[in-house]
Amino acid sequence: MVAGDGGSTVKVLISGGAGYIGSTIASACSDAEIVPVILDSLVTGRREFTAGRAVYEGDISDGPLVDRLFAAHPDIDAVIHCAGLIVVPDSVADPIGYYRANVSKSLEFAAHLLRNGCRRLIFSSSAGIYKAREDLTVDEDSDIDPQSPYTRSKAISEAMFADIAAAESLHVLSLRYFNPIGADPKMRSGLQLRRPTHALGSMIRARDEGLPFVITGTDWPTRDGTGIRDYIHVWDLAAAHVAALTRFDSLPGPATAINLGTGNGTTVRELLGMFNRVSDRPVRAFEAGRRPGDTAGAYTRIDRAARLLAWKPQYDIVDGIRHSLQWAEMRDGLQSVNADGLPKQRAAGFGSELNVHSVGE
Ligand SMILES: NC(=O)c1ccc[n+]([C@@H]2O[C@H](COP(=O)([O-])OP(=O)(O)OC[C@H]3O[C@@H](n4cnc5c(N)ncnc54)[C@H](O)[C@@H]3O)[C@@H](O)[C@H]2O)c1
């Protein structure tokens, strides 16, 4: 057991802890009295999201930096590896950049961690690695069939970590996230981006700009013809990491994978219906055809997460929409932004690996 054993303070290194999910995990850790130490290059992350925490600004592949970090924090009990690039179309345009960022650097990072005595690693993986069954459900035993360099980089990293875990005294838990939405309910962090490309982000943008929301594909084999996803509140994702830290040493090893979703599929049309019930300004839908590379989507069974982590989601989609809207109202006040209102690091495209047209992405 890493956390909750009543002993000394538990400390966890979070790579990518200035990003959307990593910063939420850091807040959930702090709330559970686990001390987070952040390693982030700020390539897409936000310095504001790390306020009050031990932060090392730099790259996961920077060995001397990782050595310095561990020298200052020799009591790190576990590492949560969230750092990476996440934009599917960017990965299609720049596969070398994506494999370098997500696979090569993760390999370097693993070597630096082992050199510094790390024995417990939690890896941010993606539901986008799966091939969905005909009923559009997946579980951890579903076929792995990534459809983009980004999702393939996740599947390769998982396999790479499992090989390393088989040879070294390292245990690795890959958490395969479905479709994160929402923000920290205490509004300490959320999506950095003003113009995210995933379905909920596009709805918020359509609302703000008074434009219709475009549904791409209405002839999928789902109950209403639109794509289906498993939207999981980012706080629930974060809570699952705390649960994983607490139970880490009782997990089957040396390598395990667990899906993190709600267990329920929601279609784009259903999401829009919920959005319009929560939003003060309803959004109209405009129906368009499928886009190349689109799939119907998928949702997960969550038995393994319940069994191994004693975790289940606490928030529903309406909470996720509400928190996303609340965050969107506050974000620009909390983040330093460029004159055009966009975060300084990048103009567009990050904040979610999701878009409306593939499994998880
Ligand atoms: N957001 C999603 O929809 C989603 C879904 C499934 C899995 N994931 C995975 O979750 C993790 C976090 O995603 P997110 O949504 O928070 O993205 P994000 O872009 O908000 O966060 C990624 C963080 O990693 C940092 N980073 C990137 N490369 C780095 C490097 N080489 N060294 C140090 N820091 C680096 C960035 O600055 C950023 O803070 C990623 O590994 C992603 O693949 C995300």
Image (cartoon, rainbow, N blue to C red):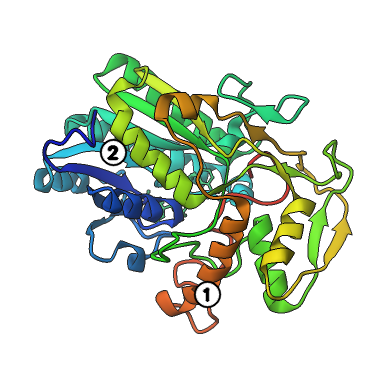
The quarter of the displayed image where residue 288 is located: bottom right
Using a 10 Å C-alpha cutoff, classify the residue at mark 1 as few (fewer than 14 neighbours), some (14 to 19) or many (20 or more): some
Q: Which residue is mark 1?
A: 342
Quadrant of residue 241 within the rendered picture: top left
Beta carbon at label 2 within 8 Å of ligand 1: no
Q: Residue furthest top?
A: 167
Q: Pointer 2: what residue?
A: 79
Describe the element under mark 2 as helix, strand or loop.
strand
Mark 2 residue crowding within 10 angstroms, few (<14) / some (14–19) / many (20+): many
The residue that appears at 75% across and 78% down in the rendered structure is 210
Amino acid under disc 1: Leu
Provide residue 189's location: percent of width, then percent of height: 42, 63
* Horizontal side, residue 215 vs residue 309: left or right: right
Residue 172, visible in the rendered structure: yes
Q: Position of residue 58 (x, y in %)?
A: 28, 55
Mark 1, secondary structure of its residue:
loop
Q: Nearer the viewer, residue 291 or 359?
A: 359
Residue depicted at x 25% and y 50%: 36
Q: Nearer the viewer, residue 349 or 309?
A: 309
Ligand 1 within 8 Å of the CB at mark 1: no
Comes first in the chain, label 1 or label 2: 2
In the rendered image, the quadrant that contains the C terminus is: top right
Q: Quadrant of the N terminus?
A: top left
- Residue 255 x, y percent position in the rendering: 39, 21
Residue at 45% x, 51% y is 235
Is 210 positioned to the left or the right of 182 in the image?
right
Going 57% across and 37% down the picture, which residue do you hit? 151
Q: Residue 39's mark?
A: none
Q: Nearer the viewer, mark 1 or mark 2?
A: 2
Tell me, yes or no, if residue 84 can be seen here: no
Q: Is residue 229 left or right of residue 73?
A: right
Q: Is residue 321 above or below residue 141?
A: below
